[in-house]
Structure formats: C-alpha cells, structure tokens
Amino acid sequence: QVQLVESGGGLVQAGGSLRLSCTGEGSIFRVSDVGWYRQAPGKQRELVVRETMSGATTYADSVRGRFTFSRDDAENTVYLQMNSLKAEDTAVYYCNANQGSIVPGGMNYWGKGTLVTVSS
C-alpha cells in the first residue's frame, strides 16, 4: 500500500492563505493522475484540482483563480497553494494518486487528509 501524507492544514482567517503539501512513496505521482479533493462537514467529497499524467489540469469552479496546483517530482511532493480563502473552503483536504485510467487494475490511493478551517 502506497502512503500519501498530507501536511499544512490549519486555522486561517478569511482572505488568508495556506499551502498544503502531500508527499508520496517512491515515484507514485509520476505514474498517476494526481489530485486534491476536499470534504466539508455533512457533504460529499469533491474535486478541488486534478492533473493527469499528460499534464492536463482541471480546477473546480469554486477554487479556480484562487488555488494553484504544483509539484516537485524530485521530492515526490505535490502542493496546493490556497489564496483568498473563504469560510466555505473549510474542509478536510485529501491528496489522491489514481492509476485507474493508466494501467489495468490500477490502484487509487488516498492520504488521510489535513483539516483546513477558515474563520470568517
């Protein structure tokens, strides 16, 4: 089982910024579609941003222009820079590495999540 470990969550005031990090084992991010998802209390998990192996990046409408995905393959780490945070961004943020569309029977890996709380 490949481990993904998120960090960087915390409490921030509305309008502030946070940067989340996710470190994966080995070169998992180089052979996966990679993304960040979030789950707010009482809601379903939703996509925040996803980047395919081919480099196509998709942002949720609610975060486009405020959040930025980046990666450092040498460090096996992906990041989510979150600016202009809003109370509705409060959620547990999960890192994801999905090989399901890349190889037959590919695995879908999740981190345990990091909590972001935005106070209004």
Image (tube, grey):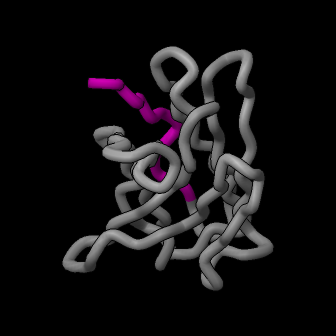
List x then y, in percent, for residue 60: 60, 77
Q: Residue at x 60, y 60 (%)?
A: 50
Is residue 75 shown left or right of residue 40? right
Q: Is residue 69 magenta?
A: no
Is residue 108 shown left or right of residue 28? left
Q: Residue furthest left?
A: 42
Up-down relation of residue 63 to residue 1 (above or below): below
* Quadrant where the image shows the N terminus: top left
Location of residue 92 by image quarter? bottom left
Up-down relation of residue 59 to residue 71 (above or below): below
Q: Residue at x 38, y 44 (%)?
A: 114
List x then y, in percent, for residue 12: 54, 55
Along the line of sight, the residue nearer the viewer: 89 or 110: 110
Up-down relation of residue 36 to residue 105 (above or below): below
Residue segment shown in magenta = 1-12
Location of residue 45 by image quarter? bottom left
Is residue 43 shown left or right of residue 16? left
Regarding residue 118, the answer to whether it shows in the image is: yes
Along the line of sight, the residue nearer the viewer: 102 or 52: 102
Along the line of sight, the residue nearer the viewer: 60 or 52: 52
Regarding residue 96, the answer to whether it shows in the image is: no
Q: Residue at x 41, y 29 (%)?
A: 5
Q: Residue furthest bottom?
A: 61
List x then y, in percent, for residue 93: 42, 54
